[in-house]
Amino acid sequence: MVVLPLAVGTEERVRGCLAQLVIFDSSSANGFEENLFCRIRRAVDGPVLVLGQRYSEAFVVRVLRLGADDCLCRPYSTQELLARIRAHLRRHWHWDAPRTDKSAGFHIDPVNYSVEISGKEIQLTPAECRLLDYLVKRAGDVVTREELYECVWGTARNDLSSNLRLCVHNLRKKLEQDPHNPRYLMTKRGVGYYWRRQTNE
């Protein structure tokens, strides 16, 4: 999850981190900023959920007509918000369906932050899960460190390099038979990382 301020340039940050779902909170002191919402709506392919301060039929109809996929007004419970998020992710991205790499023999479960290898479930941190899911989705492509910073942590700050290295190190320990000689999570020196499929198993 990446939290961004409602400000100029926010839509570029949202596009840069490849958001799968956007929650637009209109309950701030500035209220519903229509122009910013419309720019964010155009910047993302995924669903957009608007949070409102209090229920108003006119407000709900307005945001839905502007392109929101859903509108949830206070009071609401955390469980209801999470249920709606999962429903939109499932409907739009088939997010509840584990991503599978048959060559590596495992399934990624992004909902429960886990990966199943040969029937054994291995727990991942949210950052590890986002990194693995993104690399498997882009299998074969070298992904730059800067792009991974944006995808996993929502920012391209260079001081995240140690976080990325630790994340890769931990994933190799959890997934590779020999973490020091990886078969899947590969390094492209000076550039970034990539997921290598095994074609001749």
Image (cartoon, grey):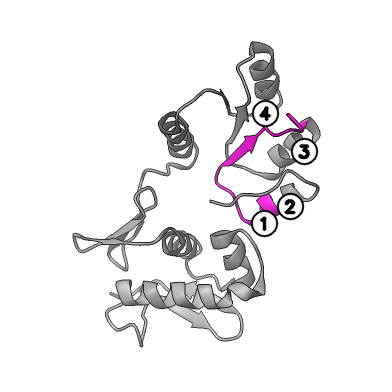
Q: Quadrant of residue 97?
A: top left
Q: Position of residue 59 (x, y in %)?
A: 68, 18
What residue is shown at x 64% (from left), y 70% (from top)? Answer: 146
What residue is shown at x 68% (from left), y 24% (from top)? Answer: 63
Residue nearer the viewer, 117 or 56: 56
Q: Residue beneath label 4, please?
A: 67
Residue type, numbered disc 4: Gly
Q: Residue beneath label 3, please?
A: 36
What residue is shown at x 34% (from left), y 82% (from top)? Answer: 179
Residue 58's place in the image compared with 38, above or below, is: above
Give the distance between the C-alpha atoms of the residues marked 4 and 2, in whole angstroms. 18 Å
Taking the magenta stretch, the answer to whether it contains residue 29 is yes
Residue 131's place in the image compared with 177, above or below, is: above
Label 4, secondary structure: give it.
loop
Magenta residues (range): 13-33
Most distant residue in the left direction: 119
Q: Residue beneath label 1, please?
A: 16
**Which one is earlier in the sequence, the residue at label 4 or at label 1?**
1
Residue type, numbered disc 3: Leu
